[in-house]
Image (spheres, rainbow, N blue to C red):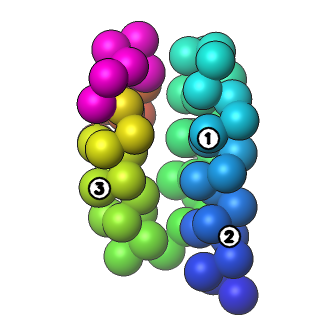
Amino acid sequence: MPRMIYDYTKSVLERVSFDPNLFRKELRKALKALLPYELEQLKKWLDYFTNNRPDLKACVSVLD
């Protein structure tokens, strides 16, 4: 079940990536829903996903 939440979180983040405020909001929700090891995986995925999106790169600091 937790794997489904992780995949769902990634798909939501991809869909709201047009708006940094929504992206940040969804990241905050992910902090509450995901397990610690899933958060580590999400951080790695976010590093890749936001590589060419400087407006979203700043939002990743929510996870730290």
49 vs 21, left or right, is left
Residue drawn at point x = 60 percent, y = 26 percent: 17
Q: Nearer the viewer, residue 44 or 21?
A: 44
**Residue 5 — which label?**
2
**Residue 55 — which label?**
none
Disc 2 secondary structure class: helix
Reply yes or no: does residue 57 show up in magenta.
yes
9 vs 45, left or right, is right
Neighbour tally class for label 1: few under 14, some 14-19, many 20 plus, Cα within 10 Å: many
Neighbour tally class for label 2: few under 14, some 14-19, many 20 plus, Cα within 10 Å: some
Q: Nearer the viewer, residue 40 or 29?
A: 40
Q: Going from the N terminus, do you reach mark 2 or mark 1 first?
A: 2
Q: Which residue is mark 1?
A: 13
Q: Amino acid at mark 2?
A: Ile
Residue drawn at point x = 28 percent, y = 42 percent: 47
Q: CA distance from mark 2 to mark 1?
A: 12 Å
Q: Position of residue 16 (x, y in %)?
A: 69, 29
Q: Amino acid at mark 1?
A: Leu
Quarter residue 9 falls in: bottom right
Q: Position of residue 7 (x, y in %)?
A: 63, 66
Reply yes or no: does residue 24 show up in magenta.
no
Quadrant including the C terminus = top left
Quarter residue 18 falls in: top right
Q: Say if mark 2 contacts mark 1, CB within 8 Å.
A: no
Quadrant including the N terminus = bottom right
Residue drawn at point x = 41 percent, y = 12 percent: 55
**Residue 44 — which label?**
3
Q: Amino acid at mark 3?
A: Lys
| 37 shown above or below 30 | below
